[in-house]
Image (cartoon, rainbow, N blue to C red):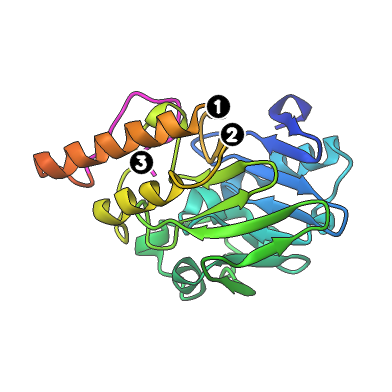
Amino acid sequence: MNSRDVDLLQDGIFRIRGRSRGSHSYVIRGSKGNMLIDSGLDSNFPGLKESLHSINMKVRDIDIVVNTHEHFDHIGANRYFQDSSIIAAHRFAANKMSFDDRYVTLYKSGDANDIRLHVHLWLESRSRLDLGSFTFDVLHTPGHTSGSICIYDPERRILFTGDTLFAGGVLPVIAESGSTGDYINSLKSLQTRMINEVYPGHGEVSTDPQGDIQISIEKAFKLLESGAAGEKERGGAAASDY
């Protein structure tokens, strides 16, 4: 990764594109603190570090890392931040991460000096993250996993969705701890929010959130009707294997 992998989405908001099926990472530079949303694959950390340098930031400049859920492609590089940053996740995700439940997280660093991932802050739905010039609400959106969250800025009407919602309505896998019924309910809850743009964990930015939510709901109902809940849907730019 380098400066070509970094996109300025809005003033103070950067996307660092994931590679090799790793999730995107989002950097929010606030007046009272800096936040990283999802650290991505462990193996992508050298590129993540280089991309931070390209926007004049270092690892220690990140005050808080918020994970949108517990899968390895979103939490893998946490271990490089956890000594200098607060690591935060919804309590259902934090529980799996803290107890090293690799069946659910699918995490495997491949490093001989592997250390257990630590979560400092166990979030609840409606928790608030105040970075000064940015204020975010944590929305618990189970479905893809039990610990999935979205991070919402009501002033700018932007939503960071992890693997809950992708551009084009590409459907994520309903993973081991997830539920298709919960997923539909979470999407219906998101329909009540005023959202102008969606910043997902994989793929491109969505500029038609309501349309994409509706498409995803319809696809999820079809999965239930066909008895194929949890079946993988292919064909999108997003990493729907997760």
Name the image quarter holding the N terminus.
Answer: top right
Seen in the picture, residue 219 relative to 142 is either above or below; the reply is: above
What residue do we see at 57% from left, 68% from top?
117
In the rendered image, which quarter contains the C terminus?
top left
Quarter of the image where one finds residue 169: top left
Cβ–Cβ below 8 Å for labels 3 and 2?
no
Q: Nearer the viewer, residue 17 or 45?
A: 17
What secondary structure is found at the residue carrying circle 3? loop
Q: Which marked residue is nearer to the observer: mark 3 or mark 2?
A: 2
Mark nearer the N terminus (3 vs 1): 3
Q: Which mark is residue 172?
A: 3
Residue 172 is situated, as x and y percent measured from the top left of the image, at: 35, 41
Cα–Cα gap, marks 3 and 1: 19 Å
Q: Is the Cβ of the residue at disc 2 closer than 8 Å to that at disc 1?
A: yes
Q: Earlier in the sequence, mark 2 or mark 1?
A: 2
Q: Amino acid at mark 1?
A: Thr
According to the picture, the residue beneath numbered tag 1 turns out to be 207
Disc 3 to disc 2, C-alpha distance: 21 Å
